[in-house]
Image (cartoon, rainbow, N blue to C red):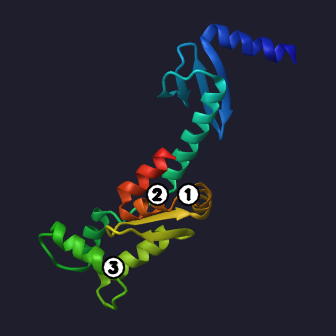
Amino acid sequence: MSKLFSNFKQQVLSAGLVGSFHLYGEEVKLNENKQLFISGELVKSDVDTLEEAREYAKRYIENTKLLENIDTTIPTDTVAHYIRQYHNIEKITDTLIESYIELASSNMFTVDPVITAIKESRTLEYAGKLQYELSDGSLVAIDESTQELLNKLLSNKPEVVDYMRESKDNFIRIIREI
């Protein structure tokens, strides 16, 4: 045990570290200048205590993992690819792409192969995820563990949930701030 402590003490003294630990598989370091690093990236300055560093790192890593679990609408490049694949259209405009995305988002029946391809790609892309359409028409998809975490954190905050429902930007902003 004392050998482990002396190795840790040696690391602290030689590297200018105040503390170093692993959290959720990420290396977290606090140096003597009160700077907090996660996986080598400076994420916060002016951290006063190791406990403050630990709490901030925990929130930061959880938020990062939440953001990684959020998928957004189908990329316009993919829609343009499907349009070229199934139709002989020379100029594909943003308006045309938006129209296809809107039609694919609706439940209206169609035999257009582009719409079918978009819906099929969404089905594969969002498999195992909970998909939500926000007020601005954008889609977000989160896995069940992310949903459970959001349920716990936001159960008594309906105004925050309403704000998140407005747009993808609001949704992601809140997750970053949690």
Which residue lies at the image location 43% right of the left edge and 72% below the top edge?
A: 122
Please name the amino acid that badge 1 sits on.
Leu
Which residue lies at the image location 53% right of the left edge and 69% below the top edge?
A: 130
Quadrant location of the N terminus in the rendered image: top right
Which residue lies at the image location 53% right of the left edge and 70% below the top edge?
A: 127
Please name the amino acid that badge 3 sits on.
Ala
Element assignment for label 2: helix
Residue that numbered label 3 is attached to: 104
Relative to 91, residue 44 above or below: above
Residues at circles 2 and 3 in contact by the CB criterion of under 8 Å = no
Mark 2 vs mark 1, CA separation in Å: 7 Å
Q: Nearer the viewer, mark 2 or mark 3?
A: 2
Q: Residue furthest left?
A: 91
| Label 2 CA crowd tier, 10 Å (few <14, some 14–19, many 20+) | some
Q: Residue furthest right?
A: 1
Element assignment for label 3: helix
Which one is in front, 161 or 104?
Answer: 161
Instruction: Residue 49 in the image: state x and y as whole percent.
Output: 63, 22
Q: Nearer the viewer, mark 3 or mark 1?
A: 1
- The label on residue 160 is 2
First in sequence: mark 3 vs mark 1: 3
For residue 60, side relative to residue 137 (left or right)? right
Mark 2 vs mark 3, CA separation in Å: 29 Å
**Within the image, what quadrant is residue 11 found in?**
top right
**Within the image, what quadrant is residue 79 found in?**
bottom left
Residue that numbered label 1 is attached to: 154
For residue 90, side relative to residue 111 (left or right)? left
Instruction: Residue 121 in the image: state x and y as whole percent.
Output: 42, 72
Q: What is the tally of numbered marks visible in this picture? A: 3
| Label 1 CA crowd tier, 10 Å (few <14, some 14–19, many 20+) | some
